[in-house]
């Protein structure tokens, strides 16, 4: 099931049907596309190098003098996960989850497809069964694993 906002014609959720491991999506609250953020201490307030517009960059980099964690600050609305290359609207319910978005709320540009499934497949090949919980090796701890091209043996 994909949730669509008809006025924009953009998907604001991602399909979760057929996902075999709950750890991949941590589907939360029955909301399609709502996921748990990985390793929050490492990925706070980062902006991708290919961000779509200045308003998105400003929203992603917004700093708060009262809250170190963007998931705790009610003024922070958006989150970007570098290793998964996915964007989301922060769910302010005391946890670290977000609802995936497929288009920029300001400029309307399509955002990149999530690399979540590919990330899990690559880490599973390396023997990691719970990468959202376990510490993962470089380059999988950042966006380098897909930006730097294939690994050299």
Image (cartoon, grey):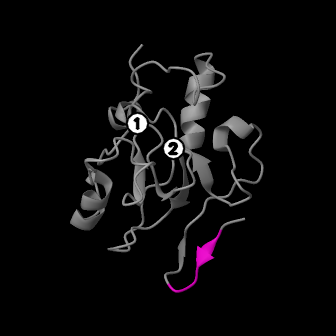
Pointer 1 local density, CA inside 10 Å: few below 14, some 14–19, many at least 20: some
Q: Tell which of 16 and 121 is nearer to you.
A: 16
- Residue 133 sits above or below residue 99 on the image: above
Q: Quadrant of residue 36?
A: top right
What SS does tag 2 mark?
Answer: loop
What SS does tag 1 mark?
Answer: helix
- The residue tagged 1 is 146
Q: Residue at x 56, y 28 (%)?
A: 122
Q: Quadrant of the C terminus?
A: top left
Alpha carbon distance from label 1 to label 2: 9 Å
Q: Residue at x 44, y 67 (%)?
A: 103
User: For the view shown, which residue lies furthest in the left direction?
Assistant: 54
Q: Tell which of 68 and 118 is nearer to you.
A: 68
- The residue tagged 2 is 115
Q: Kindly indicate whether the residue at mark 2 contacts the one at mark 1 (C-beta within 8 angstroms).
A: yes
Percent coordinates x, y for residue 120 in the rendering: 60, 32
Percent coordinates x, y for residue 133 in the rendering: 59, 26
């Amino acid at each position: 099931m994909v949730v669509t906002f008809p006025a924009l014609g953009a998907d604001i959720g991602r399909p979760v049907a057929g996902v075999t491991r709950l750890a991949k999506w941590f589907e939360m609250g029955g909301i399609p596309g709502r996921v748990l953020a990985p390793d929050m201490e490492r990925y706070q307030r980062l902006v991708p190098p290919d961000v779509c517009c200045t308003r998105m960059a400003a929203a992603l980099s917004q700093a708060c003098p009262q809250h170190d964690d963007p998931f705790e600050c009610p003024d922070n609305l958006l989150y970007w996960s570098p290793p998964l290359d996915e964007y989301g609207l922060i769910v302010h319910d005391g946890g670290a989850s977000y609802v995936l978005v497929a288009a920029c709320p300001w400029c309307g540009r399509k955002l990149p497809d999530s690399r979540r499934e590919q990330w899990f497949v690559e880490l599973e090949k390396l023997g990691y069964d719970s990468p959202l919980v376990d510490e993962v090796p470089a380059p999988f701890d950042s966006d380098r694993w897909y930006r730097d091209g294939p690994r050299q043996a």
